[in-house]
Image (cartoon, grey):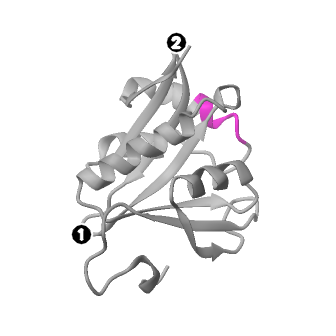
Amino acid sequence: MSAHIRAATAADIDGVLALEQLFPSDQLNRAALRRFLRVPNARVWVAVQGKVIVGDVILLLRLNADYGRVYSVVVAPAARGQGLGARLIASAERAAKAEGRNRLRLEVRSDNTAARALYVKRGYRVVATLKSYYDDGADGLRLEKALRASPIGHSPSSHQA
């Protein structure tokens, strides 16, 4: 059964939090998720298989920024290998572009080879190394993808990460 992706609602909070519990660190809490569902500069999508949430993505769109930020992407271990992560990221990319953003950024654990491979395949490149970035002390990488041609005088490699 293929999962479908839709905008998240307040009714999805428990399902998203259950998904977060599958991962040992850097878990989203109820208050943060409620805030993301309520504020105008955040977008949350869920991937639903049957009646179970098997993935989610959170996109942040800061006011007056030329980039969006993928705050979180989660896919349940049982739902991996179905292209769901790519579909969730594509949802965030489309929304960021529709909101006028030129670039999309995200952070990933440096030891998460599967996620890194997905992002590279989708056109992301490393723009910064983040020492001890995660709760457990693991290093992270900041990745970025151009969503449209950069304005003259500004290229993704010319900014501070």
Q: Which residues are magenta?
A: 18-23
- The foreground one among 65 and 41 is 65
Q: Quadrant of residue 100?
A: bottom left
Residue 38 position (above or below residue 140): above
Query: Which image quarter is the N terminus in?
Result: top right
Q: Which residue carries the number 2 mark?
A: 50
Task: Assess disc 2: are there few (<14), some (14-19) or many (≥20) residues with their C-alpha within 10 Å of its C-alpha.
Answer: few
Kindly identify the amino acid type of the residue bearing the numbered disc 1: Asn
Q: Which mark is residue 85?
A: none
Can residue 48 be seen at all in this image of the molecule?
A: yes
Q: Position of residue 63 (x, y in %)?
A: 25, 64
Distance between mark 2 and mark 1 Cα atoms:
38 Å
Q: Which residue carries the number 1 mark?
A: 64
Q: Position of residue 151 (x, y in %)?
A: 26, 77
Q: Is residue 113 left or right of residue 91?
A: right
Residue 33 shown in magenta? no
Q: Quadrant of residue 64?
A: bottom left
Find numbered disc 1 in the image and state the secondary structure of the residue it sits on. loop
Find numbered disc 2 in the image and state the secondary structure of the residue it sits on. loop
Which residue is at a point 46% across and 54% down the rendered structure image? 70
Q: Quadrant of residue 134?
A: bottom right
Kindly identify the amino acid type of the residue bearing the numbered disc 2: Gly
Which residue is at a point 61% across and 49% down the rendered structure image? 118
